[in-house]
Image (tube, rainbow, N blue to C red):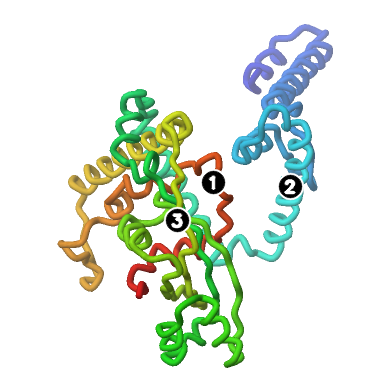
């Protein structure tokens, strides 16, 4: 009821006007309270799990954390309590940071903008690419048959290595390794010259290393040494054993299926990016940043050889030893071709 309407009633009222005015006021108050009640319902207080200095932690937030953590249904009760504490701690840290104006720090703001851009870009690609059709059993089997080195003819390498600091890999040390007949001779030489080193055992297969390196390793005699420099360290490596480690189609089918889905997603994403680039006006204001026309686009580089990426997702044979090498070991082996003797 608006003010003009109330005023009109007052001008034409009978001697009982004060009562009517009071009734009208009560109606307006009741309507206001009702509206407040509707807003309270819109906030859905039942969805709040906790309040941190007045800020609610909601079921939606918890569900998002559970989904991202990949918690199974059987573990959700226990995980929910733990993740709620994580959300509470996060809220406390966020509030403390805001008090110190860290949310306005240029580096923080830049990181937030980057994360926002990534999320939006990924959401767009997900919408455009959609759900890729599941590969047929025939497609899975075809991939299996075309890559025997990953599966039916898979070989497993057991390797020993000595790890030293990259700074200690002097020409003198390289010369000593070149003349050594075994890894133990290298170890004795290092001991004599008081150079610290560590020992590792690495297990890799033809599904874990690039084909070029794989063929080199297969052609090496047992005990052959090669040197790899990897960041702050260097490694002297010898192949101790090579044995058959085949993987059956039944064991590999799930991983092959997932790989084919991922590859298709990448292909569709690359095609969409190419479409967007073809219709966009892209101008390089800094001419030194113009890409080499002979170089493949960044998105294409990532997908240049999808088949070569497949082994990372392939399972080890049931009887294969556990892979106990670090990511750095694998990266070193991937780049180790140049270091082969």
What number is the disc on residue 320? Answer: 1
Is residue 124 visible in the rendered structure shown here? no
Calculate the distance from the C-alpha at mark 2 to the C-alpha at mark 3.
47 Å
Mark 3 vs 1, N-terminal side = 3
User: Which of label 3 and label 1 is nearer to you?
Assistant: 3
Q: Residue furthest left?
A: 293
Residue 220 vs residue 209, the one in the foreground: 220
- Looking at the rendered structure, the secondary structure element under dot 2 is helix
> Image height check: is 27 above or below 80?
above
Residue 334 can be seen in this image: yes
Q: Earlier in the sequence, mark 2 or mark 1?
A: 2
25 and 281: which is toward the camera: 281
Position of 7 relative to 178 (above/below): above
Instruction: Give the residue number, with chain letter if any, for mark 3.
Output: 242
Q: Horizontally, is 277 left or right of 319 in the view?
A: left
Distance between the alpha carbons at the discs numbered 3 and 1: 12 Å
Give coordinates of residue 323: x percent, y percent.
Answer: 55, 53
Distance from disc 2 to disc 1, alpha carbons, whole Å, reads 38 Å
Horizontal side of 43 relative to 146 (left or right) equals right
Q: Which residue is mark 2?
A: 86
Q: Secondary structure at mark 3?
A: strand
């Amino acid at each position: 009821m608006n003010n003009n309407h109330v005023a009109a009633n007052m001008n034409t009222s009978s001697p009982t006007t004060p009562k009517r005015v009071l009734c009208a006021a009560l109606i307006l108050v009741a309507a206001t309270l009702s509206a407040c009640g509707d807003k309270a319902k819109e906030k859905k207080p039942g969805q709040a799990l906790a309040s941190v200095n007045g800020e609610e932690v909601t079921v939606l937030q918890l569900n998002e954390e559970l989904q991202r953590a990949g918690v199974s249904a059987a573990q959700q009760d226990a995980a929910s309590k733990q993740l709620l504490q994580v959300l509470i701690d996060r809220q406390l840290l966020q509030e403390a940071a805001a008090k110190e104006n860290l949310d306005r720090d240029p580096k923080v703001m830049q990181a937030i903008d980057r994360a926002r851009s990534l999320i939006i870009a990924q959401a767009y690609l997900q919408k455009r690419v959609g759900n890729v059709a599941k590969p047929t059993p025939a497609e899975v089997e075809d991939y299996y048959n075309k890559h025997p080195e990953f599966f039916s003819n898979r070989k497993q390498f057991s390797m020993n290595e000595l790890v030293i600091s990259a700074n200690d890999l002097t020409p003198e040390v390289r010369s000593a390794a070149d003349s050594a007949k075994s890894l133990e001779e290298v170890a004795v030489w290092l001991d004599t010259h008081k150079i610290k080193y560590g020992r590792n055992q690495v297990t890799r297969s033809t599904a874990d290393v690039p084909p070029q390196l794989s063929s080199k390793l297969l052609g090496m005699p047992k005990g052959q040494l090669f040197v790899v420099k990897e960041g702050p360290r260097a490694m002297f490596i010898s192949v101790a054993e090579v044995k058959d480690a085949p993987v059956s189609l039944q064991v590999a089918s799930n991983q092959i299926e997932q790989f084919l889905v991922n590859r298709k997603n990448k292909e569709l994403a690359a095609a969409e990016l190419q479409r967007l680039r073809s219709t966009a006006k892209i101008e390089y204001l800094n001419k030194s940043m113009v890409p080499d026309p002979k170089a493949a686009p960044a998105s294409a580089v990532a997908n240049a050889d999808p088949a070569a990426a497949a082994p990372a997702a392939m399972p080890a044979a049931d009887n294969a030893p556990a892979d106990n090498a670090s990511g750095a070991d694998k990266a070193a082996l991937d780049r180790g071709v140049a270091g082969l003797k």
